[in-house]
Image (cartoon, coloured by chain):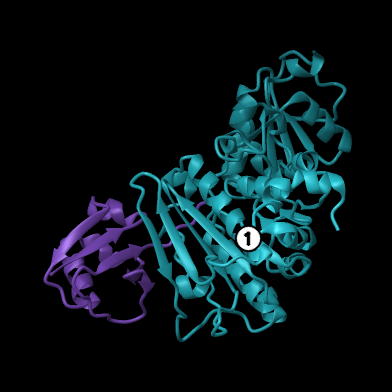
Chain colours: A cyan, B purple
């Protein structure tokens, strides 16, 4: 039975004949994992939390950066440099304190994916690359979990529900839709192709809508069907999916899954993440970060209270090999040279470390 | 007879059109062969074929007013 506050919160959807108190009860009992709290994940999370999905998990190992904000609507300027999973969880708890939110601030890999996914009943794909989708697909196959697929490019998006048996007992999955994983060069990723922020917004909400229908037991879900929508031309295609035979590629058990190589995530070229003074102080106090002052010798001091090393920007290229650590924070007087330094290191290291630049520079620390 | 062909994702950039009409074509094999002559980059691209709202696995005959869609995979999020 729902208490009075809960009944009031969900009154407008309980009033729906097809949803009702029974639908609400099913939502409150459901455990849903959203993998990727980005362009698709943010809108999906907002609506799933608002609707009262009882337990929501958020898996994302990324940090928030400025180029995320045009489409990742859970985040603001004060969140730059923080974990997406942690900030998303915090905002959703404010939105709906009656539900349980669990953050998993890690990148899912064949080593950890089964353990995380197995704690939930339904999975929502909010990732931005093929290797992650094949990995989610295979983990869900092995564990028998339904998952809601979503993907966008430029002005178009796709949604489908995979791994739910229809009346004949046939469950379609991502490998039926696209049996052969595309090569990295085959398809433009989001950064190269671009995407209008509202497109993942629409597709993420469509994923949430389909999941709410599936959990609450409504008819006419996208089980074994794919929607493709073009926002520019309004072309809408609904395609019935069929099994792709012979099937290949899905690892046969957990052990085989753990050994799978899904390839590079062909993630977008990474942009340096700028952090504010309070985040800088936090990282410095935790003591794990390598702080690097890139000002030239003879420039003003101002960093004495923080343990740091000095590598002037003019000689940084020659000293990149000396930099060590999982979290690297660059700083300079105004924040310009440190951003340049961070970009240099990212070009060299890729996403193997968290690399930051202090926005506004060292003068921000004394204010 | 004439079939309508819709191009999604990057395929529309290859063809320059979101939708074209192709006259007198019996089946999907013939259609694809003709499209690949017209748009050579199509032969290097991966996509799935949907006929009358059903994804197909093999050559499929096209009735009058058939609607065909070519769907490439895409990966953003």
Counting from the top left corner in percent of width and height, residue A164 is at: 60, 74
| Front residue of this view, candidates A275 and A25 | A25
Residue in the picture at 36% in, 66% down: B47
Residue in the picture at 69% in, 60% down: A108
Q: How many marks?
A: 1
Counting from the top left corner in percent of width and height, residue A264 is at: 56, 60
Position of residue A17 relative to residue A191, above or below, is: below
Tell me the quarter of the image containing the N terminus of chain A: bottom right
Position of residue B70 relative to residue A196, above or below, is: below
Counting from the top left corner in percent of width and height, residue A101 is at: 80, 51
Say which element carries label 1.
loop
Q: Quadrant of residue A318?
A: top right
Q: Chain of mark 1?
A: A
Residue A188 seen anywhere in this rendered image of the structure: yes
Q: Quadrant of residue A148?
A: bottom right
Tell me the quarter of the image containing the C terminus of chain A: top right
Residue in the picture at 82% in, 48% down: A6
Counting from the top left corner in percent of width and height, residue A330 is at: 70, 31
Q: Which residue is mark 1?
A: A18
| Front residue of this view, candidates A201 and A188 | A201
Q: Is residue A33 left or right of residue A367?
A: left
Q: Residues within 10 Å of mark 1 (few under 14, many from 20)?
A: some
Residue A324 seen anywhere in this rendered image of the structure: no
Residue in the picture at 18% in, 72% down: B64
Q: Is residue A141 left or right of residue A266?
A: right
Q: Is residue A59 left or right of residue A242?
A: right
């Amino acid at each position: 039975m729902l208490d009075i506050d809960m009944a009031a919160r969900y009154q407008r959807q309980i009033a729906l004949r097809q949803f009702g108190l029974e639908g609400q009860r099913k939502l409150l009992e459901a455990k849903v994992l959203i993998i990727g709290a980005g362009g698709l994940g943010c809108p999906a999370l907002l609506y799933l939390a608002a609707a009262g999905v009882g337990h929501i998990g958020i898996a994302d190992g990324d940090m928030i950066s400025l180029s995320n904000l045009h489409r990742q609507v859970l985040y603001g300027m004060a969140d730059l440099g923080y974990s997406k999973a942690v900030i998303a969880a915090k905002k959703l708890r404010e939105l709906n304190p009656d539900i349980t939110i669990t953050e998993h601030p890690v990148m899912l890999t064949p080593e950890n994916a089964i353990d995380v996914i197995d704690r939930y009943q339904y999975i929502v794909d909010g990732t931005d690359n093929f290797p992650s989708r094949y990995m989610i697909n295979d983990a869900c196959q092995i564990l028998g979990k339904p998952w809601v697929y979503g993907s966008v490019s430029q002005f178009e998006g796709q949604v489908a529900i995979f791994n739910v048996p229809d009346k004949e007992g046939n469950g379609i999955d991502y490998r039926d839709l696209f049996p052969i994983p595309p090569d990295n060069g085959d398809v433009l990723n989001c950064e190269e192709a671009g995407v209008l922020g509202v497109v993942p917004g629409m597709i993420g909400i469509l994923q949430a809508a389909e999941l709410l229908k599936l959990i609450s037991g409504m008819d006419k879900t996208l089980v074994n069907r794919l929607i493709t929508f073009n926002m520019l031309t309004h072309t809408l295609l609904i395609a019935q999916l069929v099994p792709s035979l012979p099937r290949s590629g899905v690892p046969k058990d957990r052990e085989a899954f753990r050994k799978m190589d899904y390839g590079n995530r062909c993630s977008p070229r990474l942009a340096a993440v700028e952090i504010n003074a309070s985040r800088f102080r936090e990282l410095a106090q935790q003591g794990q970060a390598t702080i690097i002052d890139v000002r030239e010798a003879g420039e003003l001091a101002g960093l004495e209270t923080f343990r740091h090393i000095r590598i002037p920007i003019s000689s940084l290229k020659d000293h990149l090999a000396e930099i060590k650590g999982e979290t690297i924070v660059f700083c300079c007087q105004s924040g310009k040279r440190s951003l340049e330094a961070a970009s240099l290191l990212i070009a060299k290291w890729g996403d193997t470390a968290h690399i930051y630049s202090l926005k506004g520079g060292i003068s921000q620390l004394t204010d | 007879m004439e079939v309508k062909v819709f191009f999604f994702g990057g395929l529309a950039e290859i063809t320059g059109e979101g939708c074209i009409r192709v006259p007198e074509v019996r089946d999907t094999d013939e259609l694809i062969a003709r499209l690949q002559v017209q748009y050579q980059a199509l032969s290097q691209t991966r996509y799935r074929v949907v006929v009358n709202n059903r994804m197909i696995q093999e050559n499929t005959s096209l009735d009058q007013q058939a609607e065909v869609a070519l769907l490439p995979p895409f990966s953003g999020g």
